[in-house]
Image: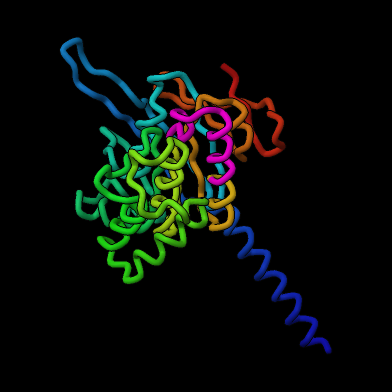
Amino acid sequence: MVHRQLSILNGETILTAVQGKQQQESIVELSGVHVTLGSHAGPVHILRGIDLEIRKGDTVSVVGPSGAGKSTMMMIMAGLESPSRGTVRVAAHELTAMDEDELALFRRDHVGIVFQAFHLVPTMTALENVAIPLEFAGVRDAFDRARDELVTVGLGHRLGHYPNQLSGGEQQRVALARALAPAPALLLADEPTGNLDSGTGSQIIDLLFALSGQRDATLVLITHDQSLAERCQRHIRVVDGLLQDGEHPLAHPDVVAIPS
């Protein structure tokens, strides 16, 4: 009886330790990240010493004025831009130590991106836009998986249509299916409703949150819409290439508001 009780107690102790580790595990770590561009008028500082940690499974909004550095920070997380200084660690990979080929493989395996302008290939059907990247990644059932993703986002009846035959909302659904099809650990969305009317945008956002949540993907959402920002667990403000921290809660109990 005593041994059984000790076993249960030890099991509880181990479980608690594992849960604590999961809660603290990070998927994004930016440390001292600077991005500086040269110009005739002198250096332009896009990001100025960004320190940021994002935990696995978080939903994080990034807000701030145009030109503040929000999109640049997202591109850094995706390995599409390199910092002038600092370290970038995403999904346990040190991006600043990788060459272009390694970064391409990293993005293929770990990151999905949804852009404001959709970025669909105009000469490919909706199905091909989702399936071809999977084929390049070596997925054997690429077209079957792409078809399933398009059905999931409500486009099962539009598989053979080209981007110019789709509405803006439908094109963004294709882009969302393409981003989610490889099962990324990190989903980055840069103003995903910026080219859509409010009703269509709301549908896209509902899909974005629902599908990323179902798949345990970490979502980083860049937006100018405060109501969208408040749907996220964390709320970050970027101003003049710096992160601003605040203490005042928003409507969501897990959201931190950043005062202007």
Examine the structure image and report whether residue 49 is included in the region drawn in magenta. no
Q: Does the magenta stretch include residue 199?
A: yes
Q: Which residue is drawn at 36% across and 55% down?
A: 127
> Is residue 87 toward the left or the right of residue 173 in the image?
left
Q: How far across and down, in percent of the image, does residue 253 sit?
A: 72, 37
Residue toward you, 15 or 141: 141
In the image, 255 versus 174, the foreground residue is 174
Residue range corresponding to the magenta coloring: 190-207
- Residue 163, by quadrant, is top left
The residue sitting at the left extreme is: 40
Q: Position of residue 200 (x, y in %)?
A: 54, 35
Asked whether 69 or 2 is in front, the reply is: 69
> Dividing the image into 4 quarters, which one contains the C terminus?
top right
Quadrant holding the N terminus: bottom right
Q: Count the numbered circles shown.
A: 0
Using the image as rendered, state which of residue 127 and residue 130 is in the foreground.
Answer: 127
**Residue name at image x 46 percent, y 45 percent:** 173
Left or right of 161, for residue 55: right
Query: Residue placed at 56% from the left, 28% from the top?
Result: 198
Looking at the picture, does residue 50 appear above or below residue 239?
A: below
Tell whether 258 sits left or right of 87: right
* Residue positioned 36% across, 41% down in the render: 165
| Identity of the residue furthest to the top in this view | 41
